[in-house]
Image (cartoon, rainbow, N blue to C red):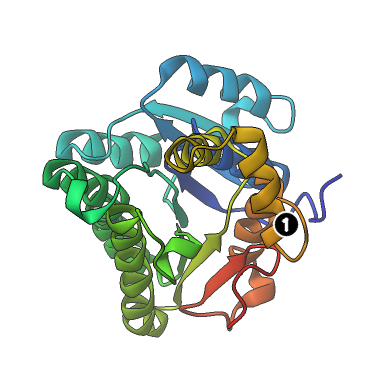
């Protein structure tokens, strides 16, 4: 059951990157149920088409635009923005959700892999945001939510490349928030801890192998370290993003909202 009105985001057009991932797809469903028009984008055509069918069960197909794109490529970004706006109108809200994980211990880290992680998780999001932000300035309003991570708030062993990209995203969020609010544009970030997704499972499987443990053992140990005793759900992340896009939080600016079951309290 949705916690929001089906008109909470009426007259909003939200562009969601990384919509083929579990957080992105859940976010698209939540925002569509809140009355938003949604543009969903990602690189996996079959997953995008499948998500579109799911969205059509909660909103009109005239409120959905699906666009296959690789946001690391300039032409893809330009075409995405142009086609989204010609189909659904001006973009009022942006959710920068596309991201990848990877990396390892510093002495084993491949610099090219680190560069790729930084490019996808930070630079590509920044490059996509810049032209959309200019349009938001002209419109006199807007919202941007960057999907960061607890890894952007504190370092952990073997996480140099990913953490660096998320620290960059949070620093950008805070700096841009200062600049954007004078144009009535709010910029915030969400920082989930371990979310019950395939990406989290891959990270835990890698850690389990490094530690000589079974995946099942490590997942139970991980849950015991979380005060709430469980992983975060994709719906909890999506609901937080949805809230940040509503008028209910007009004075929430430049925040990094943690969703971690109490893992990091400060």
Residue 183 spot, x, y in % from top left = 38, 79
Q: Residue furthest left?
A: 111
How many marks overall? 1
Residue 159, quarter of picture: bottom left
Q: Residue furthest right?
A: 1
Relative horizontal placement of residue 113, taking residue 35 as reference (left or right):
left
Q: Nearer the viewer, residue 223 or 112?
A: 223
Residue 1 spot, x, y in % from top left = 87, 44
User: What residue does disc 1 label?
Assistant: 224
- Element type at marker 1? helix
Residue 63 spot, x, y in % from top left = 58, 35
161 above or below 65?
below
Residue 104 spot, x, y in % from top left = 30, 47
Q: Residue at x 66, y 34 (%)?
A: 216
Residue 157, quarter of picture: bottom left
The quadrant of the image that shows the C terminus is bottom right
């Amino acid at each position: 059951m949705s916690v929001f009105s089906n008109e909470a985001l009426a007259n909003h057009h939200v562009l969601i990157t990384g919509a083929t991932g579990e957080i992105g797809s859940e976010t698209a469903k939540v925002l569509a149920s809140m009355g938003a028009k949604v543009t969903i984008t990602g690189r996996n055509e079959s997953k995008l088409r499948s998500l579109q069918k799911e969205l059509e069960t909660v909103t009109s197909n005239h409120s959905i635009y699906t666009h296959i794109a690789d946001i690391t490529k300039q032409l893809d970004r330009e075409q995405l923005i142009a086609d989204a706006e010609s189909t659904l109108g001006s973009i009022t809200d942006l959710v920068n959700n596309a991201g990848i994980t990877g990396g390892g211990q510093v002495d084993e880290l491949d610099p090219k892999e680190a560069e790729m992680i930084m490019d996808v998780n930070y630079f590509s999001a920044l490059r996509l945001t810049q032209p959309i932000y200019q349009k938001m300035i002209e419109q006199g309003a807007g919202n941007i939510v960057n999907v960061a991570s607890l890894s952007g708030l504190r370092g952990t062993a073997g996480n140099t490349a990913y953490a660096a990209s998320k620290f960059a995203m949070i620093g950008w969020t805070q700096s841009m928030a200062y600049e954007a609010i004078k144009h009535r544009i709010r910029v915030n970030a969400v920082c989930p801890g371990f979310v019950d997704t395939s990406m989290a499972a891959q990270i835990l499987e890698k850690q389990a192998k490094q530690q000589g443990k079974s995946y099942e053992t490590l997942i139970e140990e991980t849950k015991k370290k979380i005060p709430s005793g469980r992983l975060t759900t994709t719906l909890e992340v999506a609901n937080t993003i949805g809230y940040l896009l509503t008028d209910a939080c007009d004075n929430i600016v430049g925040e990094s909202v943690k969703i971690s079951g109490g893992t990091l309290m400060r």
